[in-house]
Image (cartoon, rainbow, N blue to C red):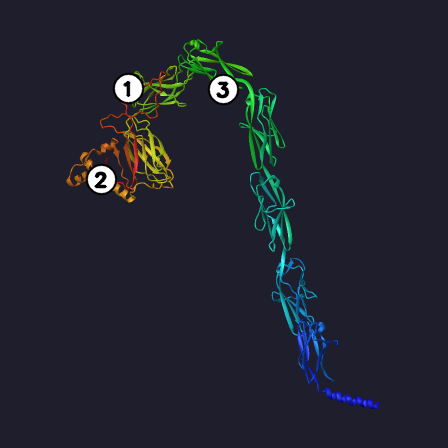
């Protein structure tokens, strides 16, 4: 036993001696590997080794290729161990053993596996709905477990200071009642204090806002059947911007022929609105946060439309006839009736209670009781509601027997035709027959009777030949419903009664006779009045004046001043002249100044020219020498220079006036006794034209300059010719002026007289105003006797019954003088002006 132990010791010493020759070393001596990482270890052998093997922490020999482990021997003394994608199970003590025969050596290495900071889930962006409890995800792992810090907008979130924030056990950040202001970038920071390791993730947090929607109008009104559109609109807010959709009666509305939507759907246009489109429409705003709806009501109104109305026929004396009118519309229309100027509405009736209106819903009836022929005609049905009205006419035809109208009495005289009118109102049209003393006209023995039948009137034309043709005539009208007769009488006409002179207003050379019309015209219209006047005890002078409706004044002219007269009147009709009135005496006034002329002003074609016409009144017993005319714009105080116009002139034209300006014109008549009060008239010129007609194209090839040059040359030659003519014939003009001033020749001396006789006159305007030229259209020779013209307001004689002109007896011996008309034109300021002391023809 002892020998055995000794042997073992010896062998052990021998073994130790042999093994000491092999040494093993692992590099690195220890290792830390992060999960998922790979690392290799090198086993180096000192001495010779046949085998170098690696063993797992569990004692299992590692073959050349194992899962996540790999062993490779690069030479005789080196072997490496590679750990791929380390995980927690890879941790432990790995052993490297080297052998060479009986020799063996080994070494171990402690491999530690740790988890570095790893963000497993930290998505960006993370979206939440406003008001919700938000859980911001940040899943991070490490070994040991990390410490999590949250930051918002660069500042650390301290949950202890804001109860809305909470950092969960899993590292998530919880925000209760998240707001839109909480939106932004958040940082999730992880730290491992043992290693001083730090890492972070930044993520965007989006807070979506639930839509809000509001109708612009909760009720929209539209009118149907007129091609109009209705706009329904809902304004929506939210985040992200919501999209608005529309539904009606549960069906979604889409863009098309009937509907139109704007880009975000907030506006819905309903085209060509019909009654069926009425109802509630739902607008819905939708985004990621949800949806919200609102209802909009569409009220569709319909304009009234009459749907039933028919013409009716009735007979006179029927108990009643009913006209019916039906109408549609929304709101329900109110129906009324009208006939001519009378309007009938529900519950109303005529004063005689024969016309009644009754309405129910959309139907109205107009009842006409005890039908009369006057009920015939058109009746208007009017349907009205708050958005419009419709109207249609219905015709009521009433059949009735004839009704005869017309003036019963007619007047005429023998040989003068007269018409008797028998006006017949009947339906159907009546047949008319005339009778005289029971015999139908015309008969074989009557050649002086003619009948003219019209649809509604029959004329009986009679030319009496003797007294037997006067008397009663019968008109009988007949249709299928009955007949009616009426007697007409033809009465012999008489001469009129005498008018009554009520007052005579005398002047110097005229007298105004005011009279009362005759009580009797003799049955036929008055044609003329005969006025007679005389010196007491002398022969009567007479003149006839035409009858004017409503005029009971006649002006007698040609009287002598301060003279006593008698005047009387009679009336004349077709039958002849009636008795004269009682004579009235009067005395004309002494010679005096004239009465003011009566004026009338009219715009000329130019628009800034005025034509002033005057009518001479009483001349004061002396001939009018001339008229004095002056004018001015109403807004200025100064009058234009006075213009002298010949006595025979009756009008003048003022040219070159200011546009759109009111002018006042005074005209004074002057005789040898003095001047009359001025006749006054005011008139406004036209507004200045805004457009000037352009020159015609394609006309003459001459330019404007050439035309102006030609006109200047022609004008100059005319001036020379006129001046030479004036020098030799009238002793005037530029040559005459040179002769008078240089050669000492005598100047003309008859110019002032010419002015007084009305041949011509010029007036110098010291203030650069237009010079007014007066031209007489007809002049009398200096030797011609000029009498006072006939008063212009006298009426012209009418013809007598035989067609001959009634003439004044005294008129045969008078010389007729035609009035000369005078035209006054303004001459531009640039025209040569006459010297204030000279007159030029």
Report how far apart the C-alphas of labels 1 and 3 lie in the structure.
Answer: 51 Å
Return the residue found at the far right.
1
Front-lying residue, 145 or 293 = 145
**Mark 2 highlights which residue?**
717
How far from the left and from the top, in percent, is residue 402? 53, 17
How far from the left and from the top, in percent, is residue 397? 56, 23
* Foreground: disc 2 or disc 1: 2
| Displayed quadrant of residue 362 | top right
Which SS class for mark 2? helix
How far from the left and from the top, in percent, is residue 1? 84, 89
Q: Residues within 10 Å of mark 3 (few under 14, many from 20)?
A: some
Which SS class for mark 1? helix
In the displayed structure, 566 sits above or below 694; it is above
Q: Is residue 353 visible?
A: no
Q: Which mark is residue 812?
A: 1
Left or right: where 53 falls relative to 264: right
**Is there CB contact under 8 Å for labels 2 and 1?**
no
- Of mark 3 and mark 2, the one earlier in the sequence is 3
């Amino acid at each position: 036993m002892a020998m055995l132990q000794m042997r073992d010791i010896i062998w052990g010493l021998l073994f130790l001696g042999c093994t000491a020759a092999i040494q093993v070393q692992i590099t690195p001596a220890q290792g830390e590997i992060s999960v998922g990482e790979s690392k290799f270890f090198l086993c180096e052998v000192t001495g010779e080794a046949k085998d170098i093997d690696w063993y797992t922490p569990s004692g299992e020999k590692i073959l050349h290729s194992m899962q996540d482990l790999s062993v490779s021997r690069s030479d005789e003394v080196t072997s490496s161990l590679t750990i791929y994608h380390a995980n927690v199970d890879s941790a432990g003590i790995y052993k490297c053993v080297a052998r060479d025969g009986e020799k063996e050596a080994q070494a171990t290495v402690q491999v530690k596996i740790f988890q570095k900071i790893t963000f497993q889930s930290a998505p960006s962006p993370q979206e939440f709905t406003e008001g919700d409890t938000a859980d911001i995800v940040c899943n991070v792992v490490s070994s040991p477990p990390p410490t999590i810090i949250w930051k918002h907008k660069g500042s650390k979130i301290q949950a202890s200071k804001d109860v809305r924030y909470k950092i969960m056990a899993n590292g998530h950040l919880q925000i209760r009642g998240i707001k839109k202001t909480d939106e932004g970038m958040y940082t999730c920071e992880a730290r491992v204090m043992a290693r001083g390791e730090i890492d972070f993730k930044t993520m965007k947090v989006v807070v979506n806002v639930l839509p809000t929607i509001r109708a612009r109008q909760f009720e929209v009104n539209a009118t149907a059947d007129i091609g109009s559109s209705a706009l329904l609109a809902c304004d929506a807010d939210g985040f992200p911007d919501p999209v608005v959709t529309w539904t009606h009666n549960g069906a979604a509305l889409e863009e098309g022929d009937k509907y139109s939507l704007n880009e975000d759907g907030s506006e819905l246009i309903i085209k060509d609105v019909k009654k069926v489109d009425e109802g509630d429409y739902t607008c819905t705003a939708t985004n990621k946060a949800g949806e919200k709806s609102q209802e909009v009501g569409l009220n569709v109104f319909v304009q009234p439309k009459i749907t039933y109305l028919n013409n009716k026929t009735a007979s006179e004396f029927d108990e009643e006839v009913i006209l019916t009118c039906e109408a549609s519309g929304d709101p329900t229309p109110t129906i009324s009736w009208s006939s001519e100027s009378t309007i009938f509405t529900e519950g109303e009736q005529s004063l005689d209670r024969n016309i009644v209106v009754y309405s129910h819903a959309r139907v109205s009836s107009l009842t006409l009781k005890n039908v009369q022929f006057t009920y015939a005609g058109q009746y208007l049905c009017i349907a009205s509601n708050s958005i419009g009205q419709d109207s249609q006419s219905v015709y009521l035809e009433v059949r009735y027997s004839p009704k005869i109208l017309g003036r019963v009495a007619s007047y005429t005289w023998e040989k003068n035709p007269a018409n008797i009118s028998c006006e017949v109102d009947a339906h159907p049209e009546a047949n008319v027959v005339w009778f005289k003393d029971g015999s139908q006209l015309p008969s074989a023995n009557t050649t002086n009777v003619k009948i003219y039948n019209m649809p509604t009137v029959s004329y009986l034309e009679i030319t009496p030949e003797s007294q037997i043709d006067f008397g009663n005539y019968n008109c009988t009208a007949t249709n299928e419903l009955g007949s009616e007769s009426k007697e007409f009488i033809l009465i012999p006409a008489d001469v009129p009664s005498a008018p009554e002179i009520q007052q005579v207003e005398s002047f110097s050379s005229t007298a105004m006779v005011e009279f009362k019309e005759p009580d009797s015209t003799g049955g036929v219209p008055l044609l003329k009045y005969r006025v007679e006047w005389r010196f007491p005890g002398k022969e009567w002078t007479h003149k006839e004046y035409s009858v004017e409706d409503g005029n009971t004044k006649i002006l007698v002219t040609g009287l002598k001043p301060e003279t006593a007269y008698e005047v009387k009147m009679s009336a004349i009709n077709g039958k002849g002249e009636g008795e004269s009135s009682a004579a009235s005496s009067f005395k004309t006034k002494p010679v005096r100044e004239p009465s003011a002329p009566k004026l009338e002003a009219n715009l000329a074609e130019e628009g800034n020219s005025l034509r002033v016409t005057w009518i001479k009144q009483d001349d004061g017993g002396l001939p009018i020498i001339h008229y004095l005319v002056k004018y001015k714009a109403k807004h200025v105080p100064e009058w234009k220079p006075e213009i002298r116009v010949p006595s025979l002139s009756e009008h003048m034209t003022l040219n070159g006036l200011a546009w759109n300006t009111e002018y006042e014109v005074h005209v004074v008549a002057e005789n040898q006794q003095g001047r009359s009060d001025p006749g006054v008239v005011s008139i406004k010129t036209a507004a200045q034209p805004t457009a000037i007609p352009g020159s015609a194209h394609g006309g003459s090839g001459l330019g404007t300059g050439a035309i102006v040059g030609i006109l200047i040359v022609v004008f100059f030659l005319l001036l020379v010719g006129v001046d030479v003519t004036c020098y030799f014939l009238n002793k005037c003009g530029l040559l005459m002026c040179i002769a008078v001033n240089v050669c000492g020749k005598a100047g003309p001396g008859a110019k002032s007289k010419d002015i007084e006789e009305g041949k011509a006159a010029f007036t110098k305007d010291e203030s650069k105003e237009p010079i007014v030229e007066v031209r007489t259209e007809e002049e009398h020779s200096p030797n011609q006797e000029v009498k006072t013209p006939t008063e212009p307001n006298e009426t012209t004689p009418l013809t007598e019954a035989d067609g001959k002109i009634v003439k004044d007896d005294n008129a045969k011996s008078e010389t007729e003088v035609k009035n000369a008309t005078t035209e006054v034109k303004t001459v531009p300021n640039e025209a040569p002006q006459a010297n204030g002391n000279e007159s030029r023809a």
